[in-house]
Image (spheres, helix red, strand yellow):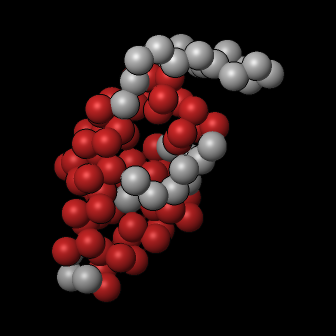
């Protein structure tokens, strides 16, 4: 599957791959603390993940695990477009 950058979009920054890997690993390991959302610059999303984890007594941390796996399975271009440009909040 080929991914083309939409016209008018700024070029993809060179650190997207490292940010994707870091956010993915943090999502898998510390997903309940929302660290992966803070890495992406989504402070409110990170706080929401913390609240969900506390309210569900830790069960809600599965959301971070799933998100981390999804991050790592996306191509760099897809990750950049969905999570850094469009600021996709959930899955």
Residue at image position (25%, 83%) is: 56
Q: Is residue 61 left or right of residue 16?
A: left
Residue at image position (29%, 62%) is: 63
Can residue 24 be seen here? The reply is yes
Q: Is residue 66 left or right of residue 84?
A: left
Name the spot of residue 66 as percent of width and height, x first: 26, 53
Q: Is residue 22 left or right of residue 77?
A: left
Name the spot of residue 69 as percent of width and height, x first: 25, 42
In depth, the one of 10 and 37 nearer the eye is 10
Q: Quadrant of the N terminus?
A: top left
Name the spot of residue 71 as percent of width and height, x first: 35, 38
Name the spot of residue 13 as percent of width and height, x first: 59, 18
In this rendering, the count of numbered labels is 0
Residue at image position (39%, 67%) is: 49
Work out which residue is located at the far bottom of the displayed protein and give it. 55
User: Measured along the vertical axis of the image, is residue 54 above or below residue 9?
Assistant: below
Can residue 27 be seen here? The reply is no
User: Measured along the vertical axis of the image, is residue 87 above or below residue 2?
Assistant: below
In depth, the one of 47 and 65 nearer the eye is 65
User: Measured along the vertical axis of the image, is residue 82 above or below residue 65?
Assistant: above
Work out which residue is located at the far front of the displayed protein and give it. 1
Q: Is residue 46 left or right of residue 22?
A: right
């Amino acid at each position: 599957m080929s991914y083309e950058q939409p016209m008018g979009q700024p070029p993809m920054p060179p650190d997207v791959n490292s940010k994707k890997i870091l956010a993915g690993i943090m999502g898998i390991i510390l997903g309940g603390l929302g660290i992966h959302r803070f890495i992406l610059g989504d402070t409110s999303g990170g706080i929401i993940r913390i609240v969900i984890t506390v309210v569900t007594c830790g069960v809600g941390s599965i959301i971070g695990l799933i998100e981390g796996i999804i991050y790592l399975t996306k191509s760099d271009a897809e990750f950049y477009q969905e999570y850094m440009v469009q600021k996709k909040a959930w899955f």
